[in-house]
């Protein structure tokens, strides 16, 4: 028989769409507080939020006659008609959160508006109102949630341990705190303050308060605006990569989200700058016109749909790429890093086998203790106002406008300012500018040059080749010769004039113009070796990886270069799209500032 479910049963089923664990409750309540204009929000939890949650804010409060109405399903002050769904400008809008929460817990709400002389206290258990009375209280709203799933014991077994639930809450609250830097947000677990932000509008202050000074120290500022799009935030240099995406926070129009579009834009900006399995830290806050965004596609509003994914992706990629093309993005040697290595080298280890300073890509495993640690620091940096954008809808941009990028955005790194000093160990080129000393890995640099030139030749219709006075022959494996149709056009696209000569032998009469004969021969040997692994030449990325793997013919460490060759190498590197890393992700540059050198000589 088909029948309508009783209200108490329907409430509990619907609640599962939004309320599946304590962190869901806190997210909904925090969003309500922010929508209410709060400048201070305090979150208190016990037992991972399973037995006790209290969220207190100093927002506008709820009018006395509306307090109980707020717990009704689809009761909301955020929208009034279906047309409002086309351009949502608040975090909440469905009117389901409080109804879903009270359906599966014991809830107490205390609230007062500015105009009211007394507040209102509402107590609800399992969607049933127990108390509705006047009470004395400060302006704002406090919601206390006790005994989650007390009336649905089957759901309690799906909750994790107290510590695991606390970690989820800390991570979520920290992400919202980063997005609302003008709101003072405090998280208390039991009797311990996990962290407390200042609410001063500075992104970097909040990052340091939540994730620690080590994360905040090297972050690169991102700030860009174009055609109604505005982005602010910070990203880590390639040398400070992480083993996961745990420190990637994306916020769109004030809403913390998961976004494959923004992830892809970030990955593209770091392409060939990171090893496989490494990820940058990123804290990006995007504002776009509300009518170009649909937030009504996921029950928990974690995901959004952009009107034009490619437009957003291209904007974010360009903004992050610009942030990475600065001097501060290069790996830096610091006195403190060297001292750490000095003390970790033990007397039992011979000097030659002691670990070398780790410059770059060996970051520690992400530790949740860093999230649960309060670190305070005043940056003392100058505020930089946001570049004016087309603010035809002011409310859309306010979430980003209020953010202060504490570090000034640097100008792009100009390699023409480098003064070449010489080389050391016939491997590293020494150079300097007005305030920084550089080591350039000649092999990594030449690999980058070689890769980009060959890839450019492959992708352009005009092939620049040079004819050989004496043709060169290559004997290949039978499997390679048998698959000629799959690979020979690829080599011709790179500038090779190659043809079958019989008996598994191929003859080469022309090679790419930028290669020397030895480089061309070495590349072909590696190429044929890779072809034996049956590479898929219809996959563009596979071809790029093949070219990348076949860059072994580049100048090696230990190859002695003349002054002219060194100068030419740096000139070619300056012309590369990405001069800062080899195709495999290793850095081409390492820098040391004048200040750090003077610290080592105790001059400062």
Image (cartoon, grey):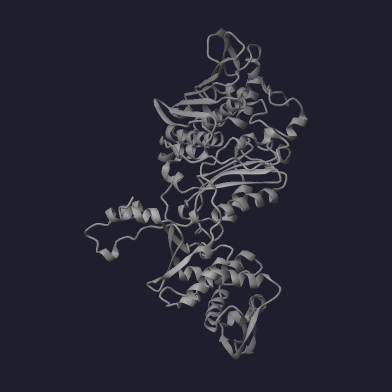
Residue 197 in picture, x, y percent from top left: 48, 32
Residue 108 vertical position relative to residue 251 in the rendered view, above or below = above
Please say if 462 is above or below 504.
Answer: above
Instruction: Look at 56% across and 86% down and name the residue there.
Output: 475
Q: Looking at the image, which is closer to me, 523 or 15?
A: 523
- At horizontal 65% and vertical 50% (from top left) the residue drawn is 315
Viewer-closest of 515 and 151: 515
Query: Does residue 507 appear to the left or right of 368 in the view shown?
Result: right
Q: Residue furthest left?
A: 347
Does 491 appear above or below 157? below
Instruction: Give the image location of residue 189, x and y in percent.
Output: 43, 28
Extreme residue toward the bottom, this view: 470
Instruction: Tally the numbered discs.
Output: 0
Note whether residue 428 is visible. no
Quadrant assignment, res 213? top left
Task: Say which of 131 and 603 sits in front.
Answer: 603
Q: Which image quarter is the N terminus in? A: top right
Residue at image position (70%, 33%) is 88
Q: Quadrant of residue 270?
A: bottom right
Residue 62 higher or lower than 485, as above or below: above
- In the displayed structure image, the side of residue 411 where residue 586 appears, left or right: left
- Residue nearest the viewer, comparing 374 with 82: 374
In the rendered image, residue 386, in percent from the top left (x then y), is placed at 61, 41
The answer, for residue 549, to whether it is visible in the render is yes
Spot occupied by residue 247 in the image (x, y as percentages of width and height)? 50, 44
Q: Which quadrant would residue 341 be assigned to in this image?
A: bottom left
């Amino acid at each position: 028989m088909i029948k309508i479910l009783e209200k108490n049963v329907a409430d509990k089923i619907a609640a599962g769409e939004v309320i599946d664990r304590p962190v869901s409750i806190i997210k909904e309540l925090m969003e309500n507080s922010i929508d209410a204009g709060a400048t201070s929000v305090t979150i208190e939890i016990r037992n991972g939020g399973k037995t006790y949650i209290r969220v207190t804010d100093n927002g506008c409060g709820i009018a006395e006659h509306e307090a109980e109405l707020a717990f009704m399903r689809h009761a909301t002050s955020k929208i009034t008609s279906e047309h409002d769904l086309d351009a949502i400008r608040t975090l909440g809008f469905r009117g389901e959160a409080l109804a879903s929460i009270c359906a599966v817990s014991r809830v107490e709400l205390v609230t007062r508006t500015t105009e009211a002389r007394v507040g209102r206290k509402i107590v609800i258990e399992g969607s049933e109102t127990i108390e509705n009375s006047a009470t004395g209280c400060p302006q704002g709203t406090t919601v206390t949630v006790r005994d989650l799933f007390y009336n649905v014991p089957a759901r309690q077994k799906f909750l994790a341990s107290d510590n695991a639930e606390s970690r989820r809450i800390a991570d979520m609250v920290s992400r919202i705190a980063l997005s609302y830097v003008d709101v003072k947000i405090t998280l208390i677990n039991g009797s311990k303050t996990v962290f407390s932000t200042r609410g001063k509008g500075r992104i970097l202050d909040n990052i340091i308060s939540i994730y620690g000074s080590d994360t905040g120290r090297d972050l690169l500022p991102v700030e860009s605006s174009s055609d109604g799009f505005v982005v602010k935030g910070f990203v880590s240099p390639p040398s400070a990569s992480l083993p996961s995406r745990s420190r990637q926070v994306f916020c769109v129009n004030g809403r913390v989200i998961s976004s494959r579009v923004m992830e892809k834009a970030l990955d593209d900006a770091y392409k060939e700058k990171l090893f496989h399995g490494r990820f940058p830290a990123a804290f990006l806050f995007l504002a776009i016109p509300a009518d170009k965004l649909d937030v009504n596609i996921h029950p928990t509003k974690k995901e959004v749909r952009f009107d034009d994914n490619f437009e957003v992706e291209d904007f974010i990629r360009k903004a992050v790429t610009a942030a990475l093309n600065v001097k501060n993005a290069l790996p830096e040697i610091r006195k403190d890093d060297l001292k750490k290595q000095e003390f970790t080298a033990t007397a039992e280890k011979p000097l030659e086998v002691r670990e070398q300073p780790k410059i770059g890509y060996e970051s520690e495993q992400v530790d949740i203790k860093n999230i649960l640690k309060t670190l305070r620091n005043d940056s003392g940096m100058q505020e930089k106002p946001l570049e004016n954008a087309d603010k035809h809808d002011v409310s859309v941009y306010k979430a980003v406008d209020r953010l202060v990028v504490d570090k000034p955005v640097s100008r792009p790194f100009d390699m023409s300012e480098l003064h070449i000093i010489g080389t050391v160990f016939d491997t590293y080129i020494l150079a300097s500018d007005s305030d920084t000393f550089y080591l350039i890995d000649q092999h990594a640099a030449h690999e980058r040059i070689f890769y980009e030139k060959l890839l450019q030749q492959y992708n352009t219709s005009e092939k620049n080749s040079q004819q050989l006075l004496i043709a060169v022959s290559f004997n290949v494996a039978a499997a390679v010769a048998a698959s000629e149709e799959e690979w020979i056009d690829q080599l011709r696209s790179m500038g090779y004039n190659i043809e079958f000569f019989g008996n598994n032998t191929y003859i080469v009469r022309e090679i790419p113009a930028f290669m020397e004969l030895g480089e061309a021969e070495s590349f072909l040997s590696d190429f044929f070796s890779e072809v034996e692994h049956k590479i898929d030449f219809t996959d563009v990325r596979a071809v790029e990886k093949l070219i990348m793997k076949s860059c072994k013919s580049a100048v090696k460490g230990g190859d002695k270069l003349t002054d002219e060759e060194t100068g030419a190498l740096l000139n070619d590197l300056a012309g590369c799209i990405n001069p800062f890393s080899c195709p495999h992700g290793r850095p081409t540059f390492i820098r040391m500032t004048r200040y750090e050198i003077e610290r080592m000589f105790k001059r400062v």
